[in-house]
Image (tube, rainbow, N blue to C red):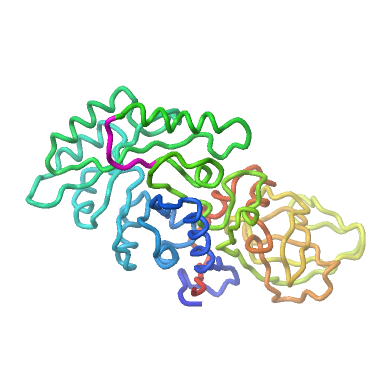
Amino acid sequence: MTRAFTPTSRPLQALVDVAAMTHNLEQARQRAGSRPIWAVVKANAYGHGIENAVRAFARADGLALLEIDEAQRARAAGWTRPILLLEGVFESRDLSLIRELGLTPVVHCHEQLAMLAALPAPALPPVPVYVKVDTGMNRLGFAPQDLPGVRSRIAALPHLTLVALMTHLANADHEHGTAPRVKGQHAALQALAPDWRGDWSVSNSAALFFHEARGPEWVRPGITLYGASPRAGLSAAGLGLRAAMCLQARVLTIRSLSPGQCVGYGSQWTATRHSRIGVVSCGYADGYPRTAPMGTPVGVGGSRVPLVGRVSMDMLTVDLTDAPQVAVGAPVELWGPNISVDALAESVGTVGYELLSGLPARVRELAAGQ
């Protein structure tokens, strides 16, 4: 282990496998072919750490993120290639840092364009910008009919240069009947600017892994780089990906219960036999979902055992009756290479993205070397 954040004596940490992240980037590269890759590292690299991402994604063509402070961290960690600000600037005070850090902001609304237009125009290279167009997501992006005017305005500003047009796909992760919608969004963007000879950026992880390439573009894989699947019901391992995070705790103590005794708040689980119950140093304040159903698999000491009782703030409990070898202090895998974060997420009605990126600061992050 090479680095730790938020040191604490509590036995709970997120173990980050940098080599697995590099492997996953190579899987994306195989699908991207000659297309350059923005490695998406927003939300602290989906909970894996910006600094770890800089190491793992050294062969990416650029990093894509949201917040300037994370861009500063990437630069401080040695990243010298392009950085794309996926939501652009939020306030005028961000503008000086764009030049200082050499960032490429996305422009998705007239207010942002007005801020960028107000940049001083010294004798420096112009700031490269991406223009985002809404082709059906109905979140961020200029209305299609506004694109000609936006292009003209940027062309008239000597301190800006338009380098790419982009959009965001709404349905690439769905299994059935989505190819026409994905193709339609590609076609809609290209039809808006038939004369455009610059770069495009459309494909996210799902489009990269599940849909055919549609011409040259900068692709933007995110969740797949961290070893999780962009489609519910399809395993990451089946896509050739490796889990890059193991949320690991320990068994704090083991209780012996007689038939009829209950466990946890609300007494929701009752022993039907003489049972060994392990108390684990992880709860919902650590990012493990409170709504995880009883029976959810947990990895303990090399065995898969069921979650029992209600997940509490700092602890959860597992049935160790059929794993007699497990002792106090045994390592516990909440998700990782043996316990799929996607399967856990699906059992509670969410996605792996939320669990990985939602880790709180009190969970230690440890990075394994390449």
**Percent position of residue 195, x then y:** 27, 31
The span shown in magenta is 195-201
Indicate left or right for 298 with 209 as reference.
right
Q: Nearer the viewer, residue 291 or 26?
A: 26
* Vertical comparison of 118 with 34: above or below: above
Q: Check residue 200 for magenta coloring.
A: yes
**Percent position of residue 141, x then y:** 35, 32
* Vertical comparison of 363 with 265: above or below: below
Q: Nearer the viewer, residue 206 or 274?
A: 206
The residue at the point 22 percent across, 26 percent down is: 149
**Percent position of residue 351, x then y:** 59, 46
The residue at the point 47 percent across, 44 percent down is: 204
The residue at the point 87 percent across, 65 percent down is: 275
Indicate left or right for 147 with 274 as reference.
left
The residue at the point 20 percent across, 42 percent down is: 161
- The image quarter containing residue 334 is bottom right
Q: Which residue of the protein is positioned furthest toward the left in this rendering?
A: 123
* Vertical comparison of 17 with 82: above or below: below
- The image quarter containing residue 227 is bottom right
Q: Nearer the viewer, residue 85 or 13?
A: 85
Q: Check residue 237 for magenta coloring.
A: no
Indicate left or right for 130 with 312 as reference.
left
- The image quarter containing residue 257 is bottom right
Q: Nearer the viewer, residue 288 or 158?
A: 158
Indicate left or right for 223 with 299 as reference.
left
How many discs mark residues in the rendered view? 0
* Vertical comparison of 78 with 106: above or below: below
**Percent position of residue 323, x then y:** 82, 70
